Amino acid sequence: MPKGANSKARRQLNENGRHESQGPGTGRRRMRRRWILPLALLLMIWVVALSHYPRLPRILPGFFQLGSGPAHYVPKGLNFFALPLLAGAVYFILGVISRLASRRPSLLGRVFYGEAARSVGIMLRRFLWLMNCSILAFLLNIQFRAVQIAYGKRMDLGWDSYLLGGLILGYALAGSIILFRYALRWMRWQEDVERRA
């Protein structure tokens, strides 16, 4: 039996998976606070882009080769805001996925309910929150590096950008495997409860 899935906790949960001791809206307040850090990272990306745009030179780096400097330069224009727009899309899409997927979590066609739904939903929200923060931090790093390269202060993205990108990919892969195994364990527990009932 998974940790925290004792009979007392199951009795305290209503059919939606919320503790009866929690008032209405308690989960919503936590959810809003959870998205403050990703929103702050998104705003920082836009602040960097908007504050440097007027002073940037007329030619900006467009594409980067792995381990070297810019492979292509583009004229200064609205394309400079492609990275902040991408960051906004990441923030919005992961936020929507987090809201939708944690409402009725399911695995392999089986819907979780009660304690299992609550536990899997919490784990899923935490995973997506950390993914959102790490991707936005990576995009903020790239935005800083692009501005530095445009000013001529740097010639390449730097090892820290590649390291951060690699860590994000590693976390996404490892986190997905851990989340799948965690949900599978709760699914087996839920099936055992159904068989006993």
Image (spheres, rainbow, N blue to C red):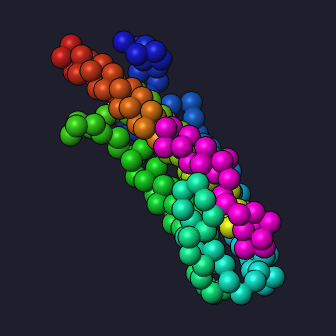
Q: Is residue 153 magenta?
A: yes
Find residue 195 and report its horizontal and vertical position in percent.
18, 17
Q: Residue at the far left: name it.
A: 195
Camera-nearest residue between 181 and 15: 181
Q: Is residue 140 visible?
A: no
Residue 87 lies in quadrant: bottom right
17, above or below 82, in the image = above
Q: Residue at x 54, y 43 (%)?
A: 166
Principal secondary structure, stretch drawn in magenta: helix
Q: Is residue 80 magenta?
A: no
Find residue 74 and report its horizontal and vertical position in percent.
59, 82
Find residue 50 and report its horizontal and vertical position in percent.
74, 77
Assign the C terminus to one quadrant of the image. Answer: top left
Q: Residue at x 76, y 66 (%)?
A: 148
Q: Residue at x 71, y 87 (%)?
A: 58
The magenta span reads 148-171
Q: Is residue 98 visible?
A: yes
67, above or below 47, in the image = above
Find residue 38 and report its horizontal and vertical position in percent.
64, 54
181, above or below 132, in the image = above
Assign the N terminus to one quadrant of the image. Answer: top left
Camera-nearest residue between 186 and 53: 53
184 displayed left or right of 103: left
44, above or below 99, in the image = below
175 displayed left or right of 183: right
Q: How many marks?
A: 0
Q: Residue at x 56, y 75 (%)?
A: 72
